[in-house]
Image (spheres, rainbow, N blue to C red):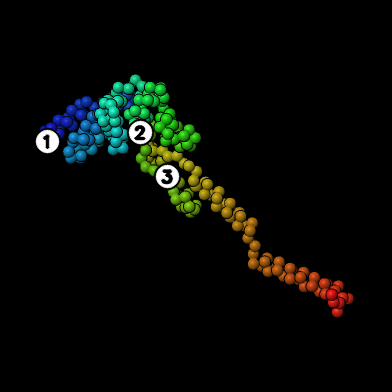
């Protein structure tokens, strides 16, 4: 049993093509190798060791095994991907999106020429229906981030308003970027938006703020005015004393 496992690993290493990203046939070939190992190698630790040998993350391996699984386990047809290789894009990311379609729908779009070699991930998203052109434009990566591997997501609570800590976080991110030259990130301007919001609140508060001393002064002025007016009215109405309707 152990010998069989070792032979599978040896054969996989022998067949694996390192430069495969831009060749549909090689993508299919490598995806079948991974899918076969994932299904048959026990324990899975050996499979993960193979991923380390080819320098591939588990996330990237999952994308490839999805392609391999679809190639050999289509809904209605066998080898649906390789049979349509001249129409399908030479991109793992784009293929991953197209795999959301059922076999019949996939072949229908190929027949209608909606799926073609030159299609982009944007085209695939719109075709599958998961992303509109407007949404895609908003979520599109900046040029410097295209081609980079996603490592982690950073999220900030939408109601978090501690400007000092946010500024400290931004400073730390810049320090990390300087320390680790192989990373980059996209600053969404969250800190600046918080600062503008806080400044606006301060401005509105200042405009609406009246000191207690000023309130007392205004009340005193109003009081004197009412007293004066009251006396004036009584004087004016004096000649009507005793008048009844």
Extreme-top residue of the structure: 86
Extreme-right residue of the structure: 239
In the picture, measured across the screen, residue 107 lies left or right of residue 189, that is left
Which quadrant does the C terminus fall into? bottom right
What separation in Å lies between label 3 and label 2 (alpha carbons)? 36 Å
In the picture, measured across the screen, residue 25 lies left or right of residue 144, that is left
Disc with the residue nearer the chain's start (3 vs 1): 1
Task: Answer with the quarter of the image where residue 61 lies.
Answer: top left
Q: Nearer the viewer, residue 119 or 194?
A: 119
What separation in Å lies between label 3 and label 1 (alpha carbons)? 47 Å
Q: Residue at x 12, y 36 (%)?
A: 2
Q: Nearer the viewer, residue 43 or 150?
A: 43
In the picture, measured across the screen, residue 132 lies left or right of residue 2, that is right
Disc with the residue nearer the chain's start (3 vs 2): 2
Q: Residue at x 21, y 35 (%)?
A: 39
Circle 2 SS class: loop
Asked if residue 19 shows in the view, the reply is no
Q: Residue 19, image x and y in percent? A: 30, 25
Badge 3 density bin: few <14, some 14–19, many ≥20, Cα 10 Å: some
Closer mark to the observer between disc 3 and disc 2: 2
Residue behind mark 3? 173
Q: Residue 98, image x and y in percent? A: 36, 30
Indicate which disc residue 100 carries.
Answer: 2
Residue behind mark 1? 2
Task: Answer with the quarter of the image where residue 117 lies.
Answer: top left
Q: Is residue 97 above or below residue 118?
A: below
Badge 2 density bin: few <14, some 14–19, many ≥20, Cα 10 Å: some
Q: Nearer the viewer, residue 198 or 75?
A: 75
Q: Residue at x 41, y 45 (%)?
A: 154
Q: Is residue 86 above or below residue 93?
A: above
């Amino acid at each position: 049993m152990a010998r069989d496992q070792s032979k599978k690993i040896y054969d996989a290493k022998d067949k694996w093509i390192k430069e495969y990203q831009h060749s549909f046939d090689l993508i299919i070939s490598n995806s079948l190798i991974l899918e076969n190992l994932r299904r048959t190698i026990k324990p899975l630790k050996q499979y993960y060791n193979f991923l380390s040998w080819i320098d591939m993350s588990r996330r990237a391996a999952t994308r490839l095994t999805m392609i391999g699984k679809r190639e050999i386990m289509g809904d209605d047809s066998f080898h649906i991907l390789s049979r349509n290789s001249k129409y399908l894009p030479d991109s793992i990311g784009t293929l991953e999106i197209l795999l959301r379609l059922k076999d019949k729908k996939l072949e229908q779009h190929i027949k209608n020429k909606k799926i073609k070699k030159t299609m982009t991930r944007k085209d695939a998203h719109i075709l599958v229906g998961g992303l509109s052109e407007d949404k895609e434009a908003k979520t599109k990566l900046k040029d410097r981030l295209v081609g980079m591997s996603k490592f982690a997501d950073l999220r900030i609570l939408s109601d978090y308003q501690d400007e000092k800590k946010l500024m400290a976080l931004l400073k730390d991110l810049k320090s990390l970027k300087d320390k680790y030259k192989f990373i980059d990130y996209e600053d969404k301007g969250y800190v600046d938006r918080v600062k503008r919001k806080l400044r606006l609140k301060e401005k509105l508060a200042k405009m609406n703020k009246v000191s207690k001393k000023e309130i007392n002064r205004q009340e005193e002025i109003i009081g004197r005015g009412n007293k004066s007016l009251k006396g004036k009215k009584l004087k004016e109405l004096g000649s009507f004393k005793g008048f009844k309707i």
